[in-house]
Amino acid sequence: MERTCLSDREHLLLEWLNTVLPVAPDRMAPASSDASFRRYFRVWYDGQTRIVMDAPPDKEDCRPFVAIGQAMRGLGLNTPEVLAGDFDQGLLLLTDLGSRQYLAELDERSVTGLYDDALAALACLQTGGDPGSPLLPPYDSALLHREMELFRDWFLGRQLGFNLREDEHQVLDHTFALLANNALEQPKVWVHRDYHSRNLMVTDPDNPGVLDFQDAVVGAVTYDLVSLLRDCYVAWPREQVESWALAHRARLRTLGMSGLDDAEQFLRWFDLMGTQRHLKAIGIFARLNLRDGKPGYLRDIPRTLGYVLAVADRYPDLAALRAMLLARQVDRWEPSS
């Protein structure tokens, strides 16, 4: 294949492919990128396609991807199979789950079937994974707080340029403690930690294909559920979202999970867990723009902030957060074109 206009890293990748594929690749093209330093390429050879993950070893570690992917496949999830790898160079050769991302396929006609499959796979993960396994770290208070601090630092402080007053810091401190405690009191399961429409692929058979699972943890039962149903990239009516959430609770109870007796409590866990995730996501989107030069994620902040404000409007515990954000007119913020 033609090697002009390739970076040094891409030359390295091609040289490695020549050692692990039975024949030289015919073509290579970007498959996707994510909100990290990883890049993905699709390669064509001998009438087949494979995916190459390029994870520079000074920035990313491939080992969790391999170990966690294998464990999740053992639970019945459709994750890519690792065909070859060089951890020292940060290169993996993977089976190809295709290019039909959930986000591009979701509409009012397809959503029920696609979400049914995604929720069934999630139930396999949540009921099959051992919360006591040493493979996954705990989603503990320190991590929950570090994530929420991204909102204070990168969005309010750096993106918006706010110099917060002491009373505003106190509101955030109180809110973060409330949201962390809400997560920690829930039944513990394996958590993908980024289970949404950009990391799920439409596959036949074994829908969905599941990607980007290397940061999995043991944490709250509602985390992946709200990540999927209150997706930062696509929104659905509240009544439908709550119906899906309660149906998933019923499925988990049928499969033997304890601690889910109170439907009202489950919805509170779900709503507040979503607020923790959405505050984190807003901070990450701002950081991707300011630090990593990826401004495209800014357009998803208004939707994500809308979730925060809508939930805060329903819970007195979050009234101070809502009042603070509205006083700062954060609800009117839009990314510049």
Image: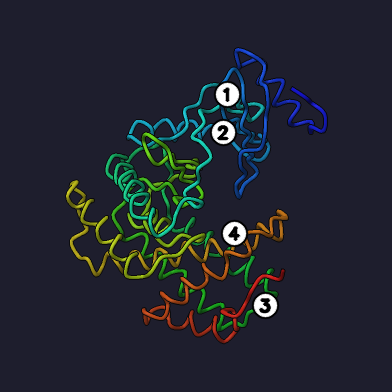
Residue 301 placement: quadrant: bottom right
Amino acid type for the residue under numbered disc 2: Cys
Amino acid type for the residue under numbered disc 3: Phe
Q: Residue at x 37, y 34 (%)?
A: 205
| Badge 4 density bin: few <14, some 14–19, many ≥20, Cα 10 Å | many
What SS does tag 4 mark?
helix
The residue tagged 1 is 85
**First of labels 1, 2 by sequence position:** 2
Disc 3/disc 4 C-alpha distance (Å): 17 Å
The residue tagged 4 is 284
The residue tagged 2 is 62
Q: Position of residue 160 (x, y in %)?
A: 67, 74
The residue tagged 3 is 162
Q: Position of residue 254 (x, y in %)?
A: 17, 49
Q: Residue at x 48, y 79 (%)?
A: 321
**First of labels 3, 4 by sequence position:** 3
- Dots 1, 2 in contact, CB < 8 A: yes
Disc 1/disc 4 C-alpha distance (Å): 29 Å
Disc 1/disc 3 C-alpha distance (Å): 45 Å
Choose between 120 and 90: the one closer to the eye: 120
Q: Position of residue 166 (x, y in %)?
A: 59, 82
